[in-house]
Image: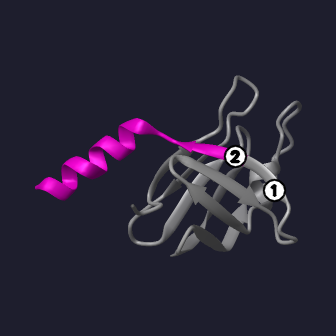
Amino acid sequence: MSAAGTWNGEGERNVASLTLTDDGRLTGTDGCNRLLGSWSEWEGGVSFNEVATTMMLCKGVDDWLSKLATARIEGDTMTVLNAEGTEIGTLTRHDEFEALSRLRETL
């Protein structure tokens, strides 16, 4: 299954969201700053490339998502790693996008 789709943080304090499109683009937010870039897939994970982020200052927002470099994917869980290979957070596949992707495959 492709990593393309929308991945969201879990819990009321983790408002991070990341969308990976089929054409290799990514967009996202940590709840304050926006991210733009590209991604590529390898067996069991993804690499994030040329990621740019806005630099707004928002109180109480954890900016961990802006430090992404790679991620491991197991089922519907994406474990995000920084450039040093340290786990910095997790995201969960958003079911609505997955349902739309499956529908598109059948058309």
Q: Which residues are magenta?
A: 90-107
Label disc, if present, on residue 87 of the rendered structure: 1
Q: Nearer the viewer, residue 63 or 84?
A: 84
Q: Nearer the viewer, residue 96 or 55?
A: 96
Callout 1 secondary element: strand
Q: Hey, which quadrant is residue 50 in on the image?
A: bottom right
Label disc, if present, on residue 106 of the rendered structure: none
Q: Tell me where residue 25 appears, x and y as whole percent.
A: 50, 68
| Mark 2 and mark 1: Cα distance apart in space | 8 Å
Quadrant (top left, top right, bottom left, bottom right) of the N terminus: bottom left
Q: Is residue 57 left or right of residue 15?
A: right
Q: Tell me where residue 96 appears, x and y as whole percent.
A: 37, 36
Residue occupied by mark 2? 90
Residue under the image location 77 percent in, 61 percent down: 81
Residue under the image location 20 percent in, 58 percent down: 105
Q: Nearer the viewer, residue 40 or 73?
A: 73
Q: Tell me if label 2 and label 1 are in contact, CB under 8 Å.
A: yes
Q: Tell me where residue 13 appears, x and y as whole percent.
A: 76, 27
Q: Hey, which quadrant is residue 52 in on the image?
A: bottom right
The amino acid at mark 2 is: Thr
Q: Hey, which quadrant is residue 23 in on the image?
A: bottom left
The amino acid at mark 1 is: Glu
Q: Tell me where residue 9 appears, x and y as whole percent.
A: 65, 38
How would you rate the neighbour count of disc 2 (Cα within 10 Å): few for under 14, some for 14-19, many for 20 or more?
many
Q: Is residue 55 left or right of residue 76?
A: right
Q: Is residue 46 left or right of residue 3?
A: right
Residue under the image location 30 percent in, 42 percent down: 99
Callout 2 secondary element: strand
